[in-house]
Image (spheres, rainbow, N blue to C red):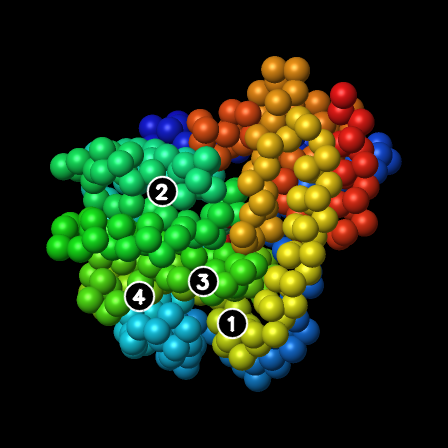
């Protein structure tokens, strides 16, 4: 009954762990959750107030498909100022971030085309390729150099059929940030070729030291760039499903066709919430400072536990340590942590083959939980 395309998509690698965690919680166990993939903060109240005000005013109908004009304009203006590259509202499409990625794949890839995706990298990059019938090809991030690009590896993987390269800086699951030198290398590679970089910048507001550099730092690169970002991680708005894509006017027109026939438009109240969020730089800053404190506690704590080898994250709320415990792989170790210590993490294997002996620890949880988690982990002998 089911299409071969859908059959080619793998189920979530972590579903059995999530079920187990829920069963433990239901049985009254205090599980320390280091597995959350979203902010544990509440959405800033003024954003919610504004969105509900707009709903009561009657803004509960369709909007223009690419987004309400004032939101597109504001996104373009803010991006232009923050990233120091002039773009206008015709280069912006408002849509949930995940859909922006999927629609980019649909717009760029024919069946059989190749798309380069990072290993380690976020779980959906590969499955979206399967959904559009394209071939995902991993490129390596170099763990010895804080998950920066292995430039030779990328060069070797680009072939006749390569249409796109996905980058994700800051990166989920590693918390690493690509250097300006790596970004320059990629810009040089795609310029004047029929290759597009899809740059997933959703964690851009959570860089602990220094400023985030977008892939798109020069207007002439617009033809070769699709930038996706959104409000989920910056303003703790995951449930509002709102983000955006920035690309050439032509690409935005094509992607808008996909939007017209699938989503119609992003949810109207969420678009107003996003409009308000663009005025609020202080909430992301506060959340970032709190994540940074948590990171420091976690890094100090895990340094004391010899089974972990860590790369302190420069951004996000994730870290991605290597594990060396009784020969267990990431899946076995994650199950073991849950069953023996009531700690949930995500097995590294979910993020690509290089994660076989790694786990993702999310510090999107309070400092007290982090401290208790560390105490429990110290029991691993
Ligand atoms: N990209 C990365 C790297 C993510 O981690 C996520 C969500 O976890 C997304 C994109 C999707 O964001 P959204 O939930 O806002 O669509």
Label 3 – label 1 distance at C-alpha: 20 Å
Q: Report the mark closest to the observer, 3 or 1.
A: 3
Label 4 – label 1 distance at C-alpha: 23 Å
Question: Label 3 belongs to which residue?
Answer: 212
How dense is the environment of label 2, judged by Cα within 10 Å: few (below 14), some, or many (20 and up)?
many
Question: Label 2 belongs to which residue?
Answer: 149
* Rendered location of residue 96, percent (x, y): 45, 59
Tell me whether the residue at label 4 lies in contact with that at label 2, contact meaning CB atoms closer than 8 angstroms: no
Q: Which residue reaches farthest top? A: 327
Front residue of 192/299: it is: 299
Question: Which comes sooner in the sequence, label 4 or label 1?
Answer: 4
Task: Identify the residue shown where x is 26% and y is 50%.
Answer: 185
Task: Identify the residue shown where x is 47% and y is 57%.
Answer: 202
Question: Which comes sooner in the sequence, label 3 or label 2?
Answer: 2
Q: Report the mark closest to the observer, 2 or 1.
A: 2
Question: Which comes sooner in the sequence, label 4 or label 2?
Answer: 2
Q: Which mark is residue 217?
A: 4
Helix, strand, or loop for circle 2? Answer: strand
Q: Is residue 194 left or right of residue 135?
A: left
Question: Which comes sooner in the sequence, label 3 or label 1?
Answer: 3
Question: Which comes sooner in the sequence, label 2 or label 1?
Answer: 2
Question: Label 1 belongs to which residue?
Answer: 274
Helix, strand, or loop for circle 1? Answer: helix
* Rendered location of residue 247, percent (x, y): 28, 63
Identify the image quadrant of residue 246: bottom left
Identify the image quadrant of residue 25: top right
């Amino acid at each position: 009954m089911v299409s071969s395309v859908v059959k080619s998509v793998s189920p979530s690698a972590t579903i059995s762990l999530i079920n187990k965690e829920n069963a433990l919680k239901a049985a009254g166990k205090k599980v320390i959750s280091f597995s959350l993939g979203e902010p544990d903060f509440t959405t800033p109240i003024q954003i919610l107030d504004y969105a509900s005000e707009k709903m009561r005013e009657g803004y509960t109908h369709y909007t223009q498909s690419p987004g309400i004009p004032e939101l597109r304009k504001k996104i373009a203006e803010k991006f232009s100022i923050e990233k120091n590259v002039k773009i206008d509202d015709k280069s912006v499409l408002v849509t949930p971030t995940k859909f922006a990625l999927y629609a980019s794949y649909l717009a760029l890839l024919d069946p059989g085309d190749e798309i380069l995706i990072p290993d380690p990298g976020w779980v959906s990059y590969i499955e979206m390729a399967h959904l559009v019938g394209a071939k995902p090809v991993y490129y390596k991030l170099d763990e010895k150099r804080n998950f920066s690009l292995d430039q030779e590896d990328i060069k070797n993987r680009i072939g006749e059929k390569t249409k796109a390269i996905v980058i994700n800086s800051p990166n989920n699951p590693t918390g690493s940030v690509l250097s300006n030198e790596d970004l320059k290398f990629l810009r040089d590679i795609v310029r004047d070729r029929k290759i597009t970089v899809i740059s997933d910048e959703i964690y851009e507001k959570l860089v602990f030291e220094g400023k985030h550099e977008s892939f798109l730092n020069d207007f002439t690169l617009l033809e070769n760039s699709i930038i996706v970002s959104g409000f989920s991680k910056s303003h703790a708005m995951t449930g509002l499903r709102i983000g955006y894509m920035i690309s050439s006017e032509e690409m935005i027109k094509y992607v808008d066709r996909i939007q017209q026939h699938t989503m119609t438009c992003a949810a109207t109240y969420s678009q107003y919430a996003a409009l308000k969020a663009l005025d609020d730089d202080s909430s992301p800053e506060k959340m970032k400072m709190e994540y940074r404190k948590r990171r420091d506690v976690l890094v100090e704590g895990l340094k004391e536990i010899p089974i972990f080898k860590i790369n302190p994250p420069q951004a996000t709320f994730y870290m991605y340590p290597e594990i060396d415990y009784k020969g267990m792989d990431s899946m076995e170790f994650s199950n073991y942590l849950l069953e023996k210590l009531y700690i949930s993490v995500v097995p590294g294997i979910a993020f690509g083959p290089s994660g076989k002996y790694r786990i993702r620890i999310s510090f999107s949880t309070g400092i007290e939980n982090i401290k208790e988690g560390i105490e429990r982990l110290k029991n691993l002998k």
